[in-house]
Image: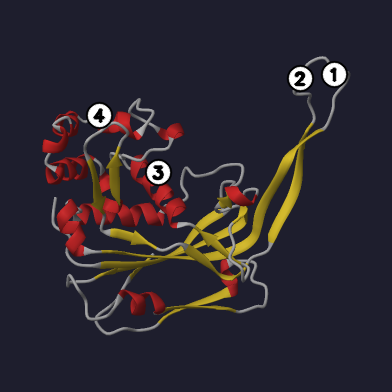
Amino acid sequence: MSELKGKIDFVLLVSATNANPNGDPLNGNRPRENFDGYGEISDVCIKRKIRNRLQDLGETIFVQSDDRADDGCTSLRDRAEKCEALKAEMKLGKKANKDKCARIACETWTDVRMFGQVFAFKGSDVSLGVRGPVSIHQAVSVSPVDLISMQITKSVNSESGKEGKASDTMGTKHRVGFGLYVVKGSVNVQLAEKTGFTQEDAENLKEALRTLFENDASSARPEGSMEVCKLFWWQHQEKTPKISTAKIHRSVKITPNVSRPKSFEDYTVELEPLEGAEPEVY
């Protein structure tokens, strides 16, 4: 395992076509949008997809979805206690070495050394937080999105005893007609040194971003409805480059060619040249 070469910045362009990229549970699971009508995908949702892809790539993940759990654990506490080294140290209670606990967790789970994690369980005298080097913004669409809703029904009775078939209303499905979303993020070298985040971890992160929607299909996001269109990846030589992350993110210029874009081809994507900052483009 090799140390991280230098700071990393990235910009990911993803499209949603007749899909719900991230439903809001407090708004009837409608696709998220801000007050100006631009679509949003939360950073938590993006990290969930990255964790899923890392798990597919064979990495050990601490925050697993229940339907993807591959270690028989049904809670974060169970997973933490399954790690014998971490369990033994945390059993020391107030005498436990928090730095050692954090080091064990980072060595054991890829997502802990990548995103960080809070370890605080009811009844435990030990609580600690790990600050991860990878930060991700919430994604925002380039243009306002059109939200489409439809009623869904079923043609079979839920309960026996009813005569004949009944078409019972089950609810409402929501989707975005089309939206191009911009995901921005970076990797901090100083924090990577603390958690043990390596260059190999960075390559796994890149691969997870490039294939973000593999094995992610669902009723809300049918296969092919979510697509990674472009990935800009800057690997700097310095820990703290002269060019700020904000300026690098702004160097990706996206301009709609029509008033109501319906596909990625309806946008022009240009990269503003920055001296000493040449990205890999996928």
Neighbor class of circle 3 (other Cα within 10 Å; few <14, some 14-19, many 20+) is many
Closer-to-camera residue (106/28)? 28
Q: What residue type is labelled 2?
A: Glu
Residue tagged 4: 81
Q: In this view, does 218 lie to the left or right of 109?
A: right
In the rendered structure, the answer to whether residue 26 lies left or right of residue 2 reads: right
**Amino acid at pointer 3:** Asn
Q: Judge depth for marks 3 and 1 and give the one in front.
A: 1
Which of 85 and 203 lies nearest the eye of the viewer? 85
- Camera-near label (3 vs 4) is 4
**Residue denoted by label 2:** 159
Quick check: marks 3 and 4 in contact, CB under 8 Å? no
Looking at the rendered structure, the secondary structure element under dot 1 is loop
In space, the residues marked 3 and 4 are separated at their CA atoms by: 22 Å
For label 1, the residue is 162
Residue 31 to residue 10: above or below: above
Amino acid type of the residue tagged 4 in the rendering: Glu
Q: Where is residue 76 in the image (x, y as percent from the top left)?
A: 34, 35
Q: Please report whichever mark, 4 or 1, sits nearer to the chain's N-terminal start.
A: 4
Q: Which residue is drawn at 61% across and 68% down?
A: 35
The image shows residue 153, relative to residue 138, as above or below, that is: above
Quarter occupied by residue 100 = top left
Say whether disc 3 or disc 2 marks the residue closer to the N-terminus. Answer: 3
On the image, the x and y values in percent for residue 244 come to: 29, 78
* Disc 3/disc 2 C-alpha distance (Å): 36 Å
Q: Name the residue under label 3.
A: 52
Where residue 184 sits in the image (x, y, percent)?
Answer: 40, 66
Judged from the image, the secondary structure of the residue bearing numbered disc 2 is loop
Disc 1: CA contacts within 10 A as few (<14), some (14-19) or many (>=20):
few
* Quarter occupied by the C terminus: bottom left
Instruction: Specify which label sits upstream in the sequence, 3 or 1.
Output: 3
